[in-house]
Amino acid sequence: MSIQVNRLSDPTVRSFVAAVNANDKAAFDALLAPGATMSDDGSDRDVADWTDREVFSSHGHMAVESEADGGRELIVSYRNDTWGEMRTKWWFTVDNGKISRFETGQA
């Protein structure tokens, strides 16, 4: 059972999930703070390169199973055209309504 996107607690994280699921790169980019960083399975990655490959060109989709830490920590059933579906954990650092860092990895 997944949590509806519009019911996610943190408004910035809610917008992040909505942008990913809508394949809306412009909305996604608008959520990132200047110089935002990210990591995948513990390794820092280039945000633009990683999101193009893992989200936008491969039609990524987040089905949120649970949230913690005020909505800034998610367990997600994530799928894309490259890897299929996998259970992942996402952590977000949000400052003034912008995401300065997000991390993801297998849950």
Image: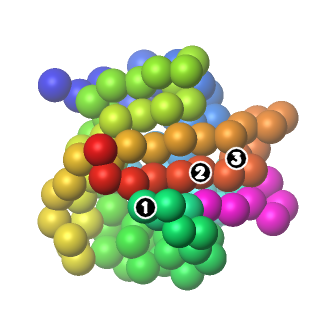
Task: From the image, state whether disc 3 or disc 2 is nearer to you.
Answer: 2
Label 1 secondary element: loop
* Marks 3 and 2 close (CB-CB < 8 Å): yes
* Residue 50 point in image, percent of width and height: 50, 75
Left or right of 21 on screen, residue 102: right
* Residue 6 point in image, percent of width and height: 44, 25
Q: Where does the magenta region start and end? A: 33-38
Cα–Cα gap, marks 3 and 2: 7 Å
The structure residue drawn at horizontal position 67% and vertical position 52%, both measured from the top left corner, is 101
Let me know if residue 20 appears in the view: no
* Marks 3 and 1 close (CB-CB < 8 Å): no
In the image, residue 29 sits, relative to residue 47, either above or below, namely above
Q: Nearer the viewer, residue 39 or 10?
A: 39
* Residue 12 point in image, percent of width and height: 63, 35
Label 3 secondary element: strand
Label 2 secondary element: strand
The disc at residue 102 is: 2
The disc at residue 41 is: 1
In the image, residue 45 sits, relative to residue 68, either above or below, namely below
Let me know if residue 53 appears in the view: yes
Question: What residue occupies the far front of the structure in this picture?
Answer: 42
Find out whether residue 36 is within the magenta segment. Answer: yes
Amino acid type, mark 1 = Asp
Q: Nearer the viewer, residue 27 or 41?
A: 41
The disc at residue 99 is: 3
Amino acid type, mark 3 = Ile
Cα–Cα gap, marks 1 and 2: 11 Å
Find out whether residue 22 is within the magenta segment. Answer: no
The local crowd at label 1, few if under 14, some if 14 to 19, many if 20 or more residues have their Cα within 10 Å, is: few
Mark 3 or mark 1: name the one nearer the start of the chain: 1
Left or right of 17 on screen, residue 37: right
